[in-house]
Image (cartoon, helix red, strand yellow):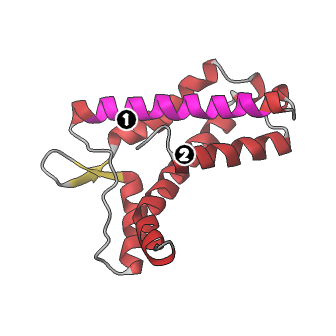
């Protein structure tokens, strides 16, 4: 769970670029300034979500970090990536629903409507952003699960 790292930065560039290309939301325009507004909006949303998840997780005894299943089969690892998008270890090490993550992704997206462009601060857009928040977490999990293997296999010196 990192706010500023290579995968998050890349995802921010991609989503901000796509938003600029599609001119969504229209209030930002298709200029470099509009791209910057989209990138800043995404970064602030990720920062708020991560802060909420870490804080609530600490209070509720949830560990938001992703732990790899490197010694398992490929299909098990894919299942682990998906499962750990919605689950987290508690203080005892048991895997439980990641309530802090649910509250953080949902809450931060609802909260961000206060500073979003009017056309983007709707219920429909909020629900879509929540879904994309979980999809982003799943993508991040997949990166952390498989990148060390890719790096070891293809980027040896």
Other-residue count near label 2 (Cα within 10 Å), few / some / many at <14 / 14–19 / ≥20? some
Residue 112 vs residue 2, the one in the foreground: 2
Image point (39%, 41%), residue name: 101
Other-residue count near label 1 (Cα within 10 Å), few / some / many at <14 / 14–19 / ≥20? many
Q: Is residue 43 magenta?
A: yes
Q: Which residue is labeled 1 in the image? A: 53
The image shows residue 107 at horizontal and vertical percentages of: 48, 30
Q: Provide the residue span drawn in magenta.
A: 35-57
Q: Is residue 64 magenta?
A: no
The image shows residue 91 at horizontal and vertical percentages of: 15, 44
Vertical side of 10 occupied by 30: above or below: above
Q: Which residue is labeled 2 in the image? A: 8
Q: In screen coordinates, is 46 left or right of 126?
A: left
User: Taken as a whole, is the magenta stretch helix, strand or loop?
Assistant: helix
Look at discs 1 and 2 and give the one toward the viewer. Answer: 2
Q: Residue furthest top?
A: 114
| SS assignment at label 2 | helix
Residue 76 vs residue 30, the one in the foreground: 30
Vertical side of 136 occupied by 147: above or below: below
Q: In screen coordinates, is 88 left or right of 34?
A: left
**Disc 1 or 2, which lies upstream in sequence?**
2
Tell me which corner region of the image, top left, top right, bottom left or bottom right, holds residue 130.
top right
Marks 1 and 2, how far apart in space? 16 Å
Image point (40%, 64%), residue name: 145
Q: In screen coordinates, is 113 left or right of 119?
A: left
Image point (34%, 54%), residue name: 66
The image shows residue 43 at horizontal and vertical percentages of: 58, 33
Quarter of the image that includes the N terminus: top left
């Amino acid at each position: 769970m990192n706010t500023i790292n290579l995968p998050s930065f890349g995802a921010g560039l991609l989503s901000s670029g796509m938003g600029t290309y599609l001119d969504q939301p229209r209030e930002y325009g298709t200029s470099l300034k509009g791209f910057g507004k989209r990138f800043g909006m995404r970064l602030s949303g990720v920062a708020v979500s991560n802060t909420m998840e870490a804080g609530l997780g600490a209070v509720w005894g949830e560990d938001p970090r992703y732990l790899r299943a490197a010694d398992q089969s490929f299909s098990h690892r894919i299942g682990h990536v998906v499962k750990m998008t919605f689950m987290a270890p508690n203080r005892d090490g048991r895997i439980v629903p990641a309530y802090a993550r649910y509250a953080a992704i949902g809450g931060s997206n609802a909260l961000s409507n206060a500073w979003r462009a009017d056309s983007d601060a709707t219920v429909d857009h909020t629900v879509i952003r929540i879904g994309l928040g979980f999809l982003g977490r799943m993508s991040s999990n997949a990166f952390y699960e498989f990148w060390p293997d890719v790096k070891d296999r293809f980027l040896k010196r």
